Image (cartoon, rainbow, N blue to C red):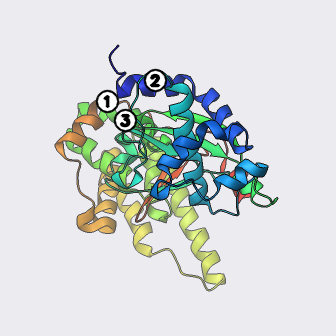
Amino acid sequence: MPEPSKKQLRKLIRNGLGGLAAQINTALKGTGLRKLKPVLTRIGHGGHLPHWYAKLKADGTLPNLDGKTIGSVVEMLLVAVLEKNLFGGLGIPPLRINPARGVDLPDLDLGVKSPSENYCTSEPFFSAYERLLGSEYDIVVLLTDYQTAKNKPPLRLQIIKWRYLTKSQIADENLCRIARTHREWLLQENEAWAKKIFRFLAYVNQSDWLAKRILKLVETLQDEDEIRRGVQEAISDFDSKNAEAERRDKPLIPDTHKEALQRLVKVKPLHLGVIDAADNWVIESQKDAGRPPNDNEWNRLRRGPLDGLIGMSFALQWRYNFGRLFKVNSHQRAQKL
């Protein structure tokens, strides 16, 4: 019988993810660890059992660990459960954990993310266009109750929710939605316009006042009345925020931001004013870093699903926010922090 392909193995994981989460939770209670011991020993540092194993086996609790180490615990237990249970009898070679190579489980081309109730993880940054195109590999998301459990020692950890995401789904849900809304129209009208809008969506920093306002205008790109309404709302917000900042002796939003919006409405047709404003923001804020999509990225932007399901923002690294995935709004996330 031929060895299953990586794709076939990922399908087994996807279809059986609920059961895998339940088996990891059983192990996190200290039950059934003896069966997993050989795998944990092999993948442990230096071929030794992980330092947390003895305590977990003795009383079902973990030492006082930080969030990053918790992620390692969950990942190791997942590998052990996969080898001993799901893949048992399939003749699969031992699995490796190698996050330094960019994918946690290279033998499966599969990433493992284990956020807690703050719903966020930090990930390596390669290209801003990942925000729309997604990752190079699928991921398993195993949400833990670490934020709650760490405040009630001893640490008893459990996985509370789980999802499997394909490559293209590991992208920003809102930005993908905007891109999908306008893609066909932009490509028919002018491919250069499409490239400018997609570049803006890839690089937009929503903590920047002007960028956030332009993004709202991009949402209504094909509706001139909505664009005018959005500009007036933005100018009112500018005046209000700066008046409040002045009273509190806080930094003001630069006048150039308001002027950019005022120039925008003088351009005909209005959607071209929005496109120019979006493009100018990228040029001014990103300088040489704000590159257009390369040929491969552009072909994928034109034809890809643009079906992102998470939130993504970036600085030196990506910040993945899985709150959307588990239907948690920003107010609920703030309460968890």
The answer to whether 142 is drawn above or below residue 321 in the figure is above
In this view, the mark in front (2 or 1)? 2
Residue at position x 40%, y 62% from top? 262
Dot 3 surroundings within 10 Å: few (below 14), some, or many (20 or more)? some
Spatial separation of the CA atoms under disc 3 and disc 1: 6 Å
Q: Amino acid at mark 2?
A: Lys
Residue at position x 20%, y 44% from top? 192
Between discs 2 and 1, the one toward the N terminus? 2
Residue at the farthest bottom position:
249
Spatial separation of the CA atoms under disc 3 and disc 2: 33 Å
Corner quadrant of residue 269:
top left
The answer to whether 278 is drawn above or below residue 75 in the figure is below
In this view, the mark in front (3 or 2)? 2
User: Contact (CB < 8 A) between labels 3 and 1?
Assistant: yes
Residue placed under numbered mark 1 in the picture: 184
Question: Is 161 in front, or is 275?
Answer: 161
Residue placed under numbered mark 3 in the picture: 182
The answer to whether 102 is drawn above or below residue 256 in the figure is above
Q: Amino acid at mark 1?
A: Glu
Residue at position x 61%, y 59% from top? 51
Residue placed under numbered mark 2 in the picture: 11
